[in-house]
Amino acid sequence: MLQGKGSYRIVSNQESGFGRCDLAVLPAYNKNRGLLLELKVAKREEDVEKSAEVAIQQIKEKQYIEGLHRKGYTDILGYGIAFYKKTCTIKRVK
C-alpha cells in the first residue's frame, strides 16, 4: 500500500548498524519520517511484554537506527513488536 504510492519503500532484513532489522519503512525523501520494526514471537502470553523489550534492546545494541542515520535518514522511529497468538505488545525506542 505505502510502496505503491512511491513515497515509501518497505524493506526486510536490511543491513543497518551491526545487523539486519526485521522490517523498515523508509521514505523516498530522507528527511521524511521512517519506521524500523523489530518483531518477536513470545513462547507464552506472559512473555509478550518482555519479548517486546528484547526487541527494543536489539534495536539499541545493534544500532539499527544509527545505521539508518548514517545512510542519510534523519527521522526514524523504532518499535519493538511482540506477538503471542492474538496478543500483541508494541513498544517504542526512546
Image (cartoon, rainbow, N blue to C red):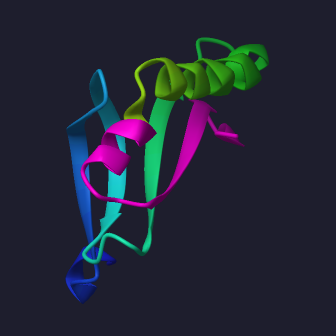
> Which quadrant of the rendered structure holds the C terminus?
top right
Residue beneath the point at 37% across and 49% down: 69
31 up-or-down from 87: above or below: below
Magenta run includes residue 70:
yes
68, 38: nearer the viewer: 68
Percent of width and height locating residue 47: 72, 15
Instruction: Indicate whether 3 appears above or below 93.
Output: below
- Residue 68 in picture, x, y percent from top left: 33, 47
Please state which of residues 18 and 58 is positioned toward the viewer in this rendering: 18
Q: Quadrant of residue 5?
A: bottom left
- Nearest the camera: 24 or 90? 24
Q: In the rendered structure, which segment of residues is drawn in magenta?
A: 65-94
Corner quadrant of residue 53? top right
- Report the side of 34 relative to 45 (left or right): left
| Position above or below: 51 against 7 | above
Q: Is residue 80 above or below residue 27?
A: above
The residue located at (58%, 37%) in the rendering is 81
